[in-house]
Amino acid sequence: MRDQALRVPWQELASACGQLAQWRSFSLWVRAIVDTERRLPAWLAAAIEHRCPAFLQSLRTGTDLQSLWLDLDEWVDFHFFSEAIHGGWIQALHYYYGRQPIGEFIWQHWTRMEEEWRARKPAEYPTFDQWQAQIAARQVPAGTAAYVEWEAFALWTRVLIEAAREIPPVVRTAVETRCPGFEKHVKALRDKPCSDPGWLWEQLRAWIEQHFFGPELKDESIDALRRAAHRTLRSERVADYWASHKQSAGGPLPTYELWLADADAFVIR
């Protein structure tokens, strides 16, 4: 799946995941109501027709209502994600949608509504907009995007230190500006901290977490923040770029901003 994902900029894949989330939520909303009613109410058929013109007409005669939501998913993929199909990354789209927190929120909400409605049929069903609003109330940990950028900064320092076998001026200046006091801190731990770039990188990550994500550490949610960050497409793409682009010794050393821009643009054609 990662090979497929690398065929497209992560921003485009993330946008497609967001669109797919809307459609998967819609099909599960349809599923929940059909499963409860054991039929397709006319008002629900009208809602489907409004969003997916001609879908119901495309169904085979005698189609099992239990598979209606699956047929809807297939129809949506073909009509709204043809670029992913033809580009060879539709499977990656499905996989990464499932890995995103929103994918879990949608599935958990459907499961909860199915259980509630099975126990007691509602007097009135929520509209799809209301269904979506209930899902949107769930939130990923605050600071996820910031954590991704800080971790990218730490990776950039590691790349350049590994290449230069010392702390080059461009890194020293950036670290002093962004993390004042860090270099003094690590020198108190080791005389030659850059002799082990991996250790220095771990120390920088720990220092960043302590100084910039203190509230998350105090309420013991730093693990949740790490997990949320590492599941983002941007975090994975930065890690892929770092793993495949080692800085050559003696070559020009990019600033963090240039390095991150290259990481964001990284694809394999």
Image: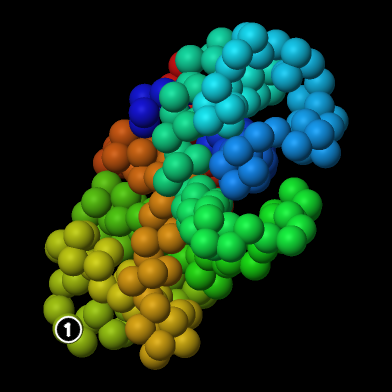
Residue 79 to residue 167: above or below:
above
Residue 3 relative to residue 28: left or right = left
Residue 99 relative to residue 68: left or right = left
Q: Position of residue 264 (x, y in %)?
A: 53, 41
Residue 223 relative to residue 31: left or right = left
Q: Is residue 256 visible?
A: no
Residue 65 to residue 55: above or below:
below
Residue found 73% across the figure and 55% down from its top: 125
Residue found 25% across the figure and 67% down from its top: 202
Furthest toward the bottom, the residue is 218
Q: Position of residue 23 (x, y in %)?
A: 65, 37
Judging depth in this view, the residue of 107 and 253 nearest the camera is: 107
Q: Position of residue 242 (x, y in %)?
A: 35, 43
Residue found 33% across the figure and 71% down from its top: 223
Residue type at mark 1: give it: Leu
- At mark 1, the secondary structure is helix
Q: Position of residue 265 (x, y in %)?
A: 54, 35
Judging depth in this view, the residue of 124 and 82 nearest the camera is: 124
Judging depth in this view, the residue of 51 and 83 nearest the camera is: 51
Residue matched to label 1:
189
